[in-house]
Structure formats: structure tokens, C-alpha cells
Image (spheres, rainbow, N blue to C red):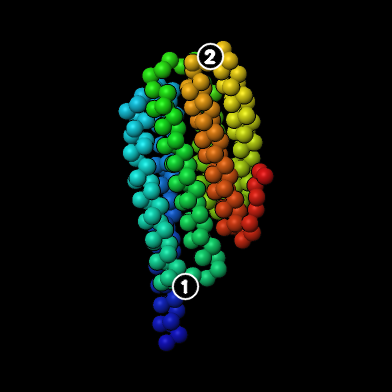
């Protein structure tokens, strides 16, 4: 009987681990789609490709649907498996991280909408720094997700530190953009949309920091504010 109980316990554990892996796989799929959306939205802004911008906006539903599936699967897992504290923490972390990823995707949509607001209007300056800022924000996201897969709190803390650079770029770029308005009053809408885009990318960095914080919580069981 004891052996049978042991087999049952092992089977339950295996089933839980399989479901948790499925949750993480869905989360990584969602993150991949969000990353692609950010890349495409900034490319649409730079190239003024309205078709690409529209595709980013349309693709958001797929990401939203994945978040909903993750939520439903996580709730079912909690209800049916009665997870212990560490397992429950893992499920909650996936839920919270999926919410951060969804918000990153929302910011990609916002960038695409800014591109559409500018349309085919000639850019007042070559767009070089915004893609660089985007690359840093996505580096933060990628790093934070790797720390999740590796359950590495130390790596998560390192990821969050990149946010200082993103914040510095945000402040500098917005200041530079606003300085163009007096000499280019007719381009106020374009300049404003570019400034908004910088803000959206800065928010992507913030959400990536939040993911890193969630990884620290998952690994250590302690809530931490990174890069505050």
C-alpha cells in the first residue's frame, strides 16, 4: 500500500510538472510574439510602413488570447492540484509575468499607432536612437526571461540594471525632440508621437524590470524592488 501511495504521489508530481511546463511554454510563446511586435512596430515607424503597423495592431489579439489561456490553465491547476507553497509561487509568477508581457505587447501597439499618426509625413530627422533604445529594452526582456528559465535571481538583478540606461536615453531623447518644436511648429504632431514612442519603449523596460522582480520572488520567496 505504501508503494502504491508512493507511485500515486510520483504520478501526481509528474502531472503537475507537465502542466507547469505547459504554462511556461505558453508564456515563452507569448513573449516571442510580443518581442516580434515591438520589433515590427519600431520598424514600421522608421520605414513609415503602414501595412506593417496595421499588422502589429491586428496581431495583438493573438497575444491577448494566449494570456487568457494561461490564466485559465493556471486557475485550473491551482483548483485541481492544491499546489504547495513553492509550486503555488511558480504558478503565480507565470500569471504575473504573462500580464507584464501583455502590457509590453500593448506598448508595441501604441508605437504602431504613433507610426500611423505620423503616416507618410517626412521625418524632421533621421530616426537612429529610438531603435537603439528599443534594442536595449528588448535585451532587458530577453535577459529577464532567461533568468526565469534558469531560475537565476542574480541574473534577474543584472537584467534590471539595464533599465538605468533606458531611462537615461528616454530623458535625453524626449528633451532633444521637444527642442525641435520652436523651429518646426508644423511638425508638432510628429515630434509628439516620437516622444510618445520613447515613452512606450521606456515602459517596456519597466515591464521587463517587473519580470525580473518576479523571478527574484520565485527563486527567493521575497518581494524585491529592483532598480528603484
Compared to 144, does 117 lie above or below?
above
Give the mark, 1 or 2, whose residue is nearer the N terminus. 1
Give the numbered dot on residue 82: 1
Residue 55's x, y, as percent? Answer: 33, 34
Which residue occupies 54% across, 43% down? 208
Give the numbered dot on residue 184: 2
Which residue occupies 39% across, 61% down? 73
- Whether residue 198 is visible here, answered yes or no, is yes
Residue 184's x, y, as percent? Answer: 53, 14
Q: Secondary structure at mark 1?
A: loop
227, 198: nearer the viewer: 198
Q: Secondary structure at mark 2?
A: loop
- Whether residue 26 is visible here, answered yes or no, is no
Give the numbered dot on residue 202: none
Which residue occupies 61% across, 61% down? 221
Q: Is residue 81 left or right of residue 89?
A: left
Amino acid at each position: 500500500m505504501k508503494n502504491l501511495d508512493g507511485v500515486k504521489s510520483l504520478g501526481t508530481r509528474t502531472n503537475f510538472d507537465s502542466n507547469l511546463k505547459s504554462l511556461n511554454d505558453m508564456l515563452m510563446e507569448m513573449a516571442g510574439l510580443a518581442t516580434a511586435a515591438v520589433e515590427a512596430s519600431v520598424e514600421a515607424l522608421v520605414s513609415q510602413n503602414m501595412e506593417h503597423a496595421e499588422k502589429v495592431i491586428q496581431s495583438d489579439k493573438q497575444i491577448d488570447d494566449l494570456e487568457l489561456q494561461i490564466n485559465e490553465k493556471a486557475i485550473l491547476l491551482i483548483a485541481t492540484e492544491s499546489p504547495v507553497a513553492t509550486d503555488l509561487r511558480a504558478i503565480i509568477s507565470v500569471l504575473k509575468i504573462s500580464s507584464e508581457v501583455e502590457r509590453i505587447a500593448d506598448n508595441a501597439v501604441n508605437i504602431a499607432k504613433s507610426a500611423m499618426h505620423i503616416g507618410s509625413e517626412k521625418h524632421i530627422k533621421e530616426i537612429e536612437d529610438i531603435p537603439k533604445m528599443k534594442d536595449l529594452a528588448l535585451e532587458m526582456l530577453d535577459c529577464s526571461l532567461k533568468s526565469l528559465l534558469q531560475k537565476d535571481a542574480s541574473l534577474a538583478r543584472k537584467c534590471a540594471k539595464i533599465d538605468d540606461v533606458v531611462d537615461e536615453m528616454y530623458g535625453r531623447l524626449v528633451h532633444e525632440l521637444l527642442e525641435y518644436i520652436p523651429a518646426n511648429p508644423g511638425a508638432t504632431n510628429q515630434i509628439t508621437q516620437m516622444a510618445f514612442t520613447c515613452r512606450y519603449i521606456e515602459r517596456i523596460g519597466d515591464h521587463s524590470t517587473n519580470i525580473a522582480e518576479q523571478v527574484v520572488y520565485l527563486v527567493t520567496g521575497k518581494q524585491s524592488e529592483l532598480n528603484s
